[in-house]
Amino acid sequence: MSVTANSVWNNCLAFIQDNIQPQAFKTWFEPIKPVKLSENALSIQVPSKFFYEWLEEHYVKLLKVALTRELGDQAKLVYIIRMENTYGNREPFTEKIPSTSRGQMSPQEMDVPIQSKNPELKNPFVIPGIRNIKIESQLNPNYNFDNFLEGDSNRLARSAGMAVANKPGGTSFNPLLIFGGVGLGKTHLAHAIGVEIKDKYPERTVLYISAEKFTQQYIESVKKNTRNDFIHFYQLIDVLIIDDVQFLSGKSGTQDVFFHIFNHLHQNGKQVILTSDKAPVDMQDIEQRLLSRFKWGLSAELQNPDYETRISILRNKLYRDGVEMPDEIVEYVAKHIKTNIRELEGAIISLIAQSSFNKKEVTLELAQQVVEKFVKNTKREVSIDYIQKVVSDYFEMDVATLQSKTRKRHIVQARQLAMFFAKKFTKASLASIGSQIGKRDHATVLHACKTVDNLAETDKQFRKYIEDLTKKFS
């Protein structure tokens, strides 16, 4: 270790110590070791990537001032991250990262991957004791683009998915976050992208995993003290697909490890694909730094399919199953089941089953019986337009008044109730609800919902409004 590096860093520490709290100095600067000085670049060793990120986020300006005092305006700081591994050898993993004066790193500034000198890899997808490091994609080949039919409700998400499949890691859609309600095809589309990539680029490592399974693997790695193995396994993936990422809510340890894996993949040009039942802005208990990563690429919403798309889905399903059905029956099912694709296909499967088991001809009457039972057993979803109409009629005003900018109390309350019921009875995001109810933002919708909850507890008359309107939507 160079004496010059020591002396420069000691002078920097003296300056830093005078400018921050003693506890902060002890926590964030005492563990740092100077490594070498090369011209005007000082290399320092830090114990983890999280440590480095914290310094860059909170102390980059202070570090810059301290270093400039010692080495002049052209001073540079290089971090060497040293992480102990669990592969049985004593060589640590190291990674050199230049500091940035902006407090954030750009993808180009962190292009040196963490390397292990031991090629053995522990794969969390194989049974312990069986030597196998091949990574299976966990993809379902039945979920492909051929049977993911395009419509107005999914055009953006499908087109973005195709672009990613054609050039994984090479588009601005990284990460690609697909969000929407239950049964609208998020998982199908995520698999379809992975299947297409495997077909076009067989040498790429593609992995599909649910956020729940990812969390279970992480917990297991902590128990067995193999956390580094877990991280390094995921850092090898070329295309990582994580389903139902909202499952990470409140799981700070899993979020932290995913944050580091995500950074490594993104900065090395790997593709990340996520699905969620909510837009990033509506996710609760997800760390802000992770949410900001989700917003780097494209968030594409899958909405309820329109009538034409529902017809196409049903006809495609019948064609694949080799079943013929009269147009009037297909149209009847499409007209009466509007909520999501899963329910739509479920109804047609029930209809085919009823016909084959009971040796009945598929008639309109049979379709009506099946659909009626099916709809009764599923929660009907009402539209935001319908909610606004019902609330406006109840308060004897028109929808335009409800959506207006006026601050009259009774109109504001009606508008807040419409937002409250839209959040309760639809799968729409807060931003989407606000946009449709008078072009408000998601924060206004959130405030409206809290206001309605509070008034329901304190205002007897307001509680009656809620009860009356709830009956209309049941």
Image: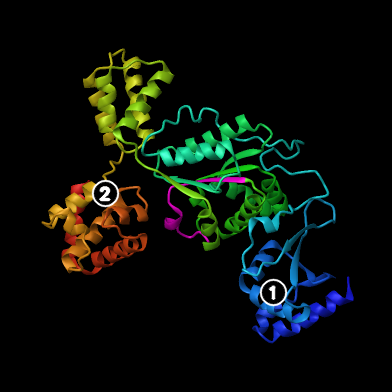
Residue type of the residue flagged with mark 1? Trp
**Residue range (magenta):** 271-287
Q: Left or right: where does residue 62 sit relative to residue 404?
A: right
Tag 2–tag 1 contact (CB < 8 Å): no
Residue 321's quadrant in the figure?
A: top left
Residue 46 x %, y %: 74, 67
Can you name the residue that lies furthest to the front here?
73
Crowding at dot 1, Cα within 10 Å, few <14 / some 14-19 / many 20+, comes out as some
How far separated are the C-alphas under marks 2 and 1?
51 Å
Numbered circle sitting on residue 250: none
Numbered circle sitting on residue 384: 2
Quadrant occupied by the N terminus: bottom right
For the point 28% across and 17% down, the residue is 326
Residue 409 x %, y %: 18, 68
Residue 354 x %, y %: 32, 20
Instruction: Kindly identify which residue carries mark 1.
Output: 28
Q: Is residue 332 magenta?
A: no
Residue 316's quadrant in the figure?
A: top left
Crowding at dot 2, Cα within 10 Å, few <14 / some 14-19 / many 20+, comes out as many
For the point 17% across and 68% down, the residue is 408
- Image: 295 above or below 40: above
**Is 216 or 149 nearer to us in this picture?**
149
Residue 309 visible from this viewpoint: yes
Residue 297 x %, y %: 52, 51
Q: Left or right: where does residue 103 sit relative to residue 387?
A: right
Residue 370 visible from this viewpoint: no
